Amino acid sequence: MSKENVRLSPPLLWGFLLPVMVFLLSACTSAGPVLRGTGDLGVLIERADGRVKIVDTSARSVLAQVEGLGDLSHASVVFSRDARYAYVFGRDGGLSKVDLLTARIVRRIMQAGNAIGGAISQDGRIVVAQNYTPGGIKAFDAETLELVADVPASYGSDGKRSKVVGLADLPGNRFVYSLFDADEIRVTDLSDPAHPVTQRFPAGHQPYDALVTPDGRYYIAGLFGEDGLAMLDLWQPQQGVRKILSGYGKGDAPLPVYKMPHLRGWAIAGGRAYLPAIGRHEVLVVDTATWQEVGRIAVKSQPVFVMARPDGREVWVNFAFPENGWVQVIDTLKQDVVDTLQPGRAILHMEFAPRGEVVWLSSRDDNRVFIYDTASHKQLHSFAAASPSGIFFTSRAARTGF
Amino acid sequence: MLNPDEAHTDSMMKPPALLLHVLVLVGLTLVSVFASATQPLASERERVLVHMVRQDCGSCHGLTLSGGLGSALTPAALAGKPVDGLVATIMDGRPGTPMPPFRGILSEAEAYWIIDQLMQGFPADRGLASQGAQR
């Protein structure tokens, strides 16, 4: 056999075939999925329409929207540990698992009559919802959303169930939460979901929300019914709940509260915790080593979110109805307000980029999301969204207490 | 800014002459235009109230008003409850619970209107009127 017989085709034919193949391959690529990461993505809640927008925080643009998520008033979101999936908890008890890359709902269940948010376990395998009706927490397999544990928030002798607030994940697949009606903090260990083990601690009157410090050590519940906050050292839970900032209202009658503040680990910056005072126009400052009050900062109105920029150099504050069009910036070295902004009507939520160079603000009543530069405090960009409320970036996937 | 009592006093007067009729009519019109008294509220104010109830009351009572930290405000949940008591809850709040007083934000006439609408099935929110150019 001669060598010529082995040749597949003459050079001239290759000259024609190669460009055609390159063209066809490139056509295939553009029609298929674009490869991308999810580390700079986020979810924006459009509360009145049961819809979320999937946003790209690098391009500052909307990638896609996902409909059919039910009643999203007070909706919240946690992310799978690979930051590909968003678990959206609706007010109506809906729990939806949304794929951020395909912009599709991959699972959706109705898990309660009335719900207020959720959390995901340290190992990412369990998603837990906190419910008002029926009061308690429920745990689901993060992959399939099958129920793996149901822990009622029962109290008293006649089987009443409390509304659950302030749920947070803890190391060891434990979850900590507060019982609004039962004045308690509970810690449920779900490391063996078939056999949940719950510890109970008296908290103080009417805990309304809570935070866990970024290291997972301290749990702090805000109290609606008394002047002070309840703190539990989760490294030494046997010591029980300690009251911090007791009597911060100095005996004054609190102002009417038209919106409950929100507490999360973003309150901690530079060894201090910045906490909203209930019924007062103040941010309370506590030293996280001694848990003593080290200051209070007068602000425009009643704070709702008091959020440290990720580097802790500034703390941004928004306010309750009817003063909810304002945002103030606290300088943490000066311990004072250094800027007062009026970005739009009804600023419901703020979310910092993972390293804090910008902050996104949702303006419910202007139907817009505003993006502010955190160095200049100037608006960089804005886009339309219908009644936007919560904004959740995937960087939360890696944080305890988010 | 809202003073429903004024309208009550005016409408109880016994006018002796045509001139007074006209004056009362003009007065009442002014009062209702500027103060949204007992009679139907100005439609823009109704829109603001619907938005406020759905969105801001909704942060505790739910956007669909089927309850949350606060109780459900659906027609079924409110059926049979005394209207005056419900209005008092709006105006003065419920001490010991997170329900705040809305006196100073709402007039009593507006609270009656809200309760009336809630008992019939609350209207859908059309949002607020847009406000000039976006910054």
Image (cartoon, coloured by chain):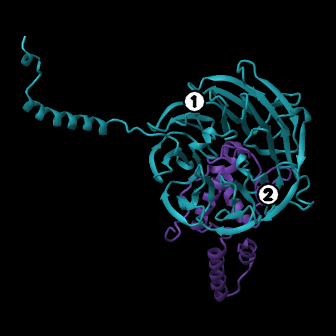
Chain colours: A cyan, B purple
Tell me the element at label 2. Answer: helix
Residue A117 drawn at (x, y percent): 66, 39
Please say if B25 is above or below B85: below
Q: Nearer the viewer, mark 2 or mark 1?
A: 1
Q: CA distance from mark 2 to mark 1?
A: 39 Å
The residue to which callout 2 is attached is B88
Q: Amino acid at mark 2?
A: Ala
Q: Residue furthest top?
A: A1
Q: Residue at x 56, y 26 (%)?
A: A143
Residue drawn 73% across and 48% down? A263
Give the residue type at disc 1: Ile
Which residue is at the front of the view, B16 or A226?
A226
Identify the residue at horizontal 48%, vertical 54% (top origin): A60
Residue A126 found in image quarter:
top right
Chain of the residue where label 1 is placed in the rendered structure: A
| Left or right side of A351 for A41 | left
Most foreground residue, A373 or A254: A373
The quadrant of the rendering that contains the C terminus of chain A is top right
Question: Which disc, if any, is residue A109?
Answer: 1
> In the orientation shown, which residue stands out farthest toward the front?
A2
Is A179 on the left-hand or right-hand side of A15?
Answer: right
What is the secondary structure assignment of the residue under circle 1? strand
Question: What number of labels is visible?
Answer: 2
